[in-house]
Image (tube, helix red, strand yellow):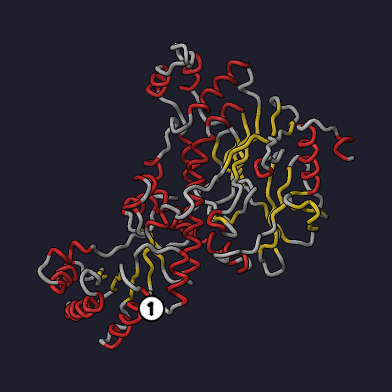
Amino acid sequence: MERDAGACVTPGMLTDLYQLTMAHAYQAAGVAGTEACFHLYFRGNPFDGGYSVACGLAQAVEYLEHLSFSPADAAYLATLTGNDGAPLFPQEFLVWLESFRFDADVLAVPEGTVVFPGEPLLRVTGPIATCQIVETALLNIINFQTLVATKAARVCRAAEGDPVLEFGLRRAQGPDGGLSAGRAAYVGGCVGTSNVLTGQRYGVPVGGTHAHSLVMLFDTELAAFLAYAEALPNNAVLLVDTYDTLGGVRNAIRAGERLRELGHDLAGIRIDSGDLAWLSIRAREILDEAGFGATRIYASNELDEHTIESLKEQGAAVDVWGVGTKLVTAYDQPALGGVYKLSAVREPGGVWQPRVKVSEQAAKVTTPGLLRVRRYFDDDGMFIGDMIYDELVPPADECVMVDPADATRRTSYCGMHSAEELLVPVFEAGACVYETPPLAESRDRALAQLSRLDPSHLRLLNPHIYKVGMELGLYERKTALILAARGFGADEGGR
């Protein structure tokens, strides 16, 4: 389990006002106990990429387990007023909130799972008021961490196996943005973080060097290096570009010679500016000539997957990549755009009735039913396609998957294809039935999942589109509901 997880519980009041006004409206109308099914998903892969990495489930579990509203929360809500100056919420609703606890079912994909647009990352089923209240926080948690984990996976792939450290806390979007980003970056493939709180709370390995200010404090660069090396002989990674980078490398070597006298070695040097390709190649030559072949070269300075890919193509002699701003802020896409949509309702114990939202934009038309996702593999275990289906009408062994963007494109799957269900039980009637794995296990899962995608889907530019579709019966039911919502019956729709 993650360390000190309970110290970062998301408060119930981290929500949008309209979740509470809707919950009140449901109560006032006597329908708060009507059961509903919602799905959390996103509409497009970030960064024009070919995949995403699901992240944030552990925080979502913590939130749902501890979800409550205190008397102080109720007292604040009692101060809110409507347009007429009267209280927005009646006292009986505030009393209900104080006794509120999460009491729904949740299915979710485990953290580190490779996912694609349109696929549910979470499914929440239970009383409509409960499902509504949790929407905002779940989106906040899952959207951001999935976005950063995906960015980290792209950066780490560009690094071609070289270690990548997350260095972005100083420019993260606030304290929690830095904390969540450090965690998500680790799931996405980074080997560690500079964020000490992320290390303490989640067990992520921490690492770092020093800043230019340490060098500037001393009269000479060499004096600064010697002081730092003697203070931390087992962590001597020296920043060499305060004045002259290659001169800094030579001073680092002199500090390294002193370290050897102390029984240690120069762990590394860091270059934070200039032509990283040329400077790293030349620094490697200088280090090797001086007998410091084991000293690693760290590079930083506004790196992202595209810059790293370019530096690798230029033959940069970089061993470790420190990626900060563009990782923790998920440059250049500020949000994932995940949504949380109603797909079915029923009276308690009754028959589920599908619901569909129709829009002028095809991408915003929702999919009805209680959805699941089945992933198919080839004989080598590589992913070949994901099928979204309605568990109320499960697909047959021989089934057809329809591309929702082009109904004439169809794929047939049969019982001979190996497959697995992506959504696993997390909560049942409000009780957690899921054991959150160690964060390192989620990171391993992400790496393993990415290795089972064809390289064409992993390209940074113009990736091949992974096959995701709807089971034929679900596609036909969705089409019929859309036609009905637009005023066309079955006969008119078929003409």
Which quadrant would residue 420 be assigned to in this image? bottom right
Residue 494 or residue 251, whichever sits in front: 494
Q: Amino acid at mark 1?
A: Ala
Image quadrant of residue 239?
bottom left
Q: Is residue 236 above or below residue 486?
A: below
| Frontmost residue, 456 versus 115 | 456
Q: Position of residue 269 (x, y in %)?
A: 28, 73
The vertical placement of 484 against 33, above or below, is: below
The percent position of residue 141, horizontal first and vertical second, equals 48, 43
Q: Is residue 27 left or right of residue 371?
A: left
* Left or right: where 149 falls relative to 384: left
Q: According to the image, label 1 marks what residue?
A: 317
Q: Residue at x 79, y 56 (%)?
A: 410
Residue at the spot x=62%, y=40% of the render?
39
Q: How far across and how far down the image is residue 225, in percent? A: 18, 71
Residue 77 in picture, x, y percent from top left: 42, 20
Q: Residues within 10 Å of mark 1 (few under 14, many from 20)?
A: many
* Quadrant that contains the C terminus: top right
193 above or below 352?
below
Q: In the picture provided, is 255 more to the left or to the right than 112? A: left
Give me the residue at 43% from left, 73% from top.
Answer: 311
Q: Secondary structure at mark 1?
A: loop
Seen at 57% across and 66% down, the residue is 459
Report if residue 260 is visible in the image: no
